Image: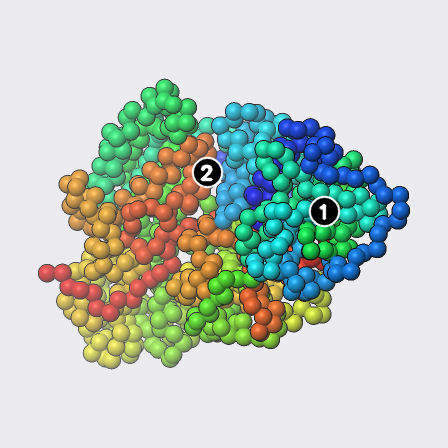
Amino acid sequence: MTGAAAGRARVRAWAVLTAAGVGLALGSDGAHARPPRPAPPPAVPAGTLDAADTAAIARRWGVRLESLRLTASGHMLDFRYTVVDARKARPLFERKSKPSLTDQASGLELAVPVPPKTGALRNSNDPQAGRTYFMFFGNPGRTVAAGNRVTLAIGAFRVGGLRVEADSIAEAGTDRRGDPGQSPPAPVGRPGPAPRVMTPQPRLGDVALLDRHGRATTLREAVDTDAPVMVNFIFTSCTTVCPIMSAGFAQLRESLGQGRGRVRLVSVSIDPATDTAERLRAYAARYGADDSWWLLTGTPAAAEAAQRAFGAYRGDRGNHAPATYLRRTRDAPWEALDGLASAQALLRAYRGDRVERPF
Amino acid sequence: MVTGSSGRSEARRPLAGGPRRALITSAALLAAAGGGAAPAPPPEPSAADLGARLYREGLSVAGAPVPAIVQGDLPVRSTDMPCVSCHRRSGWGTSEGPVTVPPVAGGALFAPVTRGHPEMGRLRTTGAGTRPAYDEPALLRAVRDGVDPAGRALAPTMPRYAIGAADAAALASHLRSLSSAPAPGVTGDTVHLATILTPEVGASRRASMLDVLRTYVRHKNAGTRNETGRRERGPWDMARHNASHRTWVLHEWELKGPAAGWPGQLRELYRRRPVFAVLGGLSEDDWTPIHEFSEREGLPAILPQTPLPPDEAHAEDFYSLYFSRGVRLEAAALAERLGPSARRVLQVSRCRGPGGAAAAALVRLAAPAVAVRSECLDGDGAAPSRAGRPDTLVLWLGPGDIARAQRMAEAAVGQGVKDVFASSSLLGDEARRLPAWLAARASLLHPFVPPGELDRHAWRALAWMKANGIAPEDRPVAVNALFAAMLAGDALAHPRALVSREYFLERVEHMAPRLPVRSALPAVVFGPQRRFASSACHVIGAPPAIP
C-alpha cells in the first residue's frame, strides 16, 4: 500500500471516531468487546501458526504479515498484510468471517468495527498478489498497549504471538527537549516498505554498460553472482532522491560489517551523458563503495534499456522513481522494494525476514 | 552545491559570492575563528553569511559537518545533503519522482498557513493542513526533530540534523534573506530583459539572432496583452496563474571596443536600465567577462551563443546557462578521437581568444600521449610555412582566417598529413560552405546536430520562422535564439518566476528538456550543477557541400 493510501486509511479511521464519537470505538456497535475473562488466557488452540514462522504462513495462507500497530491515539489497531498468493489468501477476505484479535495478557477479544456508512474497516474485495491490505480493530479503553502479544483469527486462519507496535506518528510528534549537540538524531519512523515479487520478472537482455573503471560490462554480468544482489538507479547530480538511496546502500554495507562483500550492490546511472566513469569513481568514494558495489553508466540508449529491464523507466530524470530491486539467491525471484527504503527495510530485505520488527 | 559533484565534497572551493552580498568563504571563517596570528582579522561574519554557508555547504556555525538521519534511520553527512540540495538556491523547493520539497524561503516559512491559503497543499510534505508561522525555536525543532509548528512530523525524506540554537538562528537569518527584495528589472506591468552582442559579430549573424528575438517578444506581448486584466479581475484560480504576467521589453546591449572595456560598459548599461535577465546573446569571442558580470550581479543569463564560455574555474557558478562548452568540448572530442596512438599533431589557431583556448585545451587533454605542436597566427601574419612532418592537422580558425591557412595546409597534406580537423564553433555557419580544398579532406568538430539534419531536428522552430517571415542567414543561430526565448517565456509564465531570479533559473532548468521546440544541439539538459546543456560533439567526416 502506498503512503498516500495509508494516509487515507488513517484519515478514515479518524473520521469514524469523530463522526460516531469514541463510544463507537469503545464497542457500542463495532467492536464487540467482551468482558475480560477472569481465568488466565486460554491455551493457544491447535492449528495456530506462530507469527515468526513467516514461511509457514506464506505457504499455508499466501500472505506476509507486515505490521500491527496502534493508531487513532491508541483507540484502534491497524493490521497490515501483503498478499503473495491470491488464491491461498482468499479465505482472509471472506466477508462472512468475523476477524478477532485476542490479547494474550488480558484475554480481551477485539473485533473489526462496522460503522454504518463505511462498512467493516477491513478489505473484502478480491485479493491481488503484491498488494498490502489493512484491517482495523477497535481497542476499547485502550486496553491493548504497545508491546502486548496478541492472537489473530480470521476464520480458520489463526496466528499467535503478534507484537503490537506503538503509533509511529504519535511518537514522532512528541517534543524532545534539550540540545542534542553533535550526537546524531535518534532514528524515527516506520520500518519502511516490504518487498514485492516482481511481475513480470526483469528481462536483463544484453545491455552493454561501462563500470566506473571504464571497463565494458553488461547488466547481466553485473548481477551474475550467487550472492544476494540489490539494484537501484541513480545519477550523480541528483540531489533529492539519490543521496537517500545511496546512503541506504552505504548503511546496509555498514550494518553487514565484515560480511559487506557478500552482497552485490549495483547502481546504474540514468543520466549517462553527465555520469562519466570519473564522476562515478568520485561518487563511489563519497559513499565508501568498494568493488562489490558496482556503479555503471553507458550510452543513453543502454541506460534506458537497463531501466526498462526492471520496469523502472520514467522518462526524464525529474520523474525518477526510487526503488530497490533485489534477488536473494541466483534462483530466487526478483523482488522490488518500492519507494525510499530505510536501513532497516534494506537489511530486512537482504535477510529475507520481512517481519522482523513487528513480530 | 555539494551533492552534484561528488569529487569536491571534501575539499570544496569556497562559495562564490551571491548577488551584491559578498559571501564569506570557509577559509575566511577559519581565519576568523583562529584569530591570533592573522595580521588583520577579517570582519566578523554575519549571521546571514553563516546561515548561507550552513544552507549551501552543510557546515554548522562552528564550521563542522552536522550529523543527520534521513528516511528514519539512515545516517547522512550534512555536507552530502545540505539544505540547498533539495530546497534549492532560491529556497522555493523542488520535486523529484514522488518527493515534493516545500518552500523554505522566508516569506513562505515565517508566515502562517491558514485555511484558504492558495498553496496550502504545497507548503508541507505530509499533506495539506494549516500550521502557525515558523520562528527560530520552531525552525530548530523542525530541522533537529522533524516536527513542524503544528506538532506534526515532517516527511522522513527531510533529514533530522543535529543542529543547535545558534545554527537555527543563522539559518533563519539566511532564509529571511531569500526572495526578500523584489528582483531588479521588474515593475508592476513590465519585465525588462537584455540581449548582449559583442563587437566582432558580423551583420548577418547579428540579424539572425535579433530578428528572432524581436519577433518573439512582439508576438508574446501581443498575445498576452489582456493578462494584466485577467490577473486583476479573472477567476481566483486564474489570478494566481496570471500573477507573473508582464509585458516584455527587450534591450539590445551592444558592447564596443576590446574586451577589457566590456565590464565597464555592462555596469553602465545595467545601472541605467536594470534588467531581470539576459536572454540569449551572441559572441565570437571569450564570454568570460560577461559571465563574471552576470555572476557578480546575480543576473541570470539564458543561453548566450559563444564559442568560448568560461573555463573550469567558474564551474561552481550559478547564474549563466550555456548550450555547450564550445571549443573546449570540441577539443575534448578530438582528444578522445586521437586516442593514445602515437600521432604528431600540428594545430593552427589565433594566439588568443577562442582559437587559442581550444589549442591550449587540446594540449592539456591529448599531450603527452600525443605530440602536439601549436602554431599561432597573429592578426595579419601569414600562416606558418614550416609544417614539420605531422600526420594530423587541426585548424582552430574562423571563416576569415581559414583561407590564409590554405597554402600551409596543402603543403602539410603533401608531406603526409592524413587527417584534417576544423572547428564548427569557430567557423559558424560557414562550416556548411567550406572551401572546396578543405571540404574534400577535413573532418568537422561539430557540437551541434549535423548540418544535414537541422531541418528535421528543428522543424518546429524553422516553421515558426517561416510563418513569421523570418529567413535567417545563419539558421543554427536563429534556431538557438528561438529556443532561448521560448525557454525563458515558459519559465517566466510560472506564477512564482518573478519572485526570485534563482527560482526563475530553477524553472529554466526544469523546462529545458520539456520544451516543444528544439535547439540546434542534440539535447538541452541542465541540473543543479550542470550549466552546459550538451556534452555531445559529432566528428563529421566530410560536410556536405552547399551549392
Query: Front-most of A348 and B136?
Result: A348
The residue indicated by pointer 2 is B503
User: In the image, what residue occupies the spot 58% across and 39% down?
Assistant: A8
In x, y percent, where is residue A289?
A: 61, 65
Q: Amino acid at mark 2?
A: Tyr
Q: Position of residue B309 (x, y in %)?
A: 37, 51
Is residue B352 visible in the rendered image? The answer is: no
Horizontal side, residue A304 vs residue B214: left or right: right
Let me know if residue A288 appears in the view.
yes
Q: What mark, if any, has residue A290 been given in the picture?
A: none
Rendered image quadrant of residue B113: top right
Tag 2 secondary structure: helix
User: Which residue in the structure is indicated by mark 1?
Assistant: A100
Q: Nearer the viewer, mark 1 or mark 2?
A: 1
- In this rendering, the answer to whether B220 lies above or below A256 is above
Q: Chain of mark 2?
A: B
Name the residue at 72% across, 55% down: A158
- 3D distance between C-alphas at marks 1 and 2: 54 Å
| B2 relative to B422 in the view: left or right | right
Image coords of residue B319 (percent x, y): 43, 43
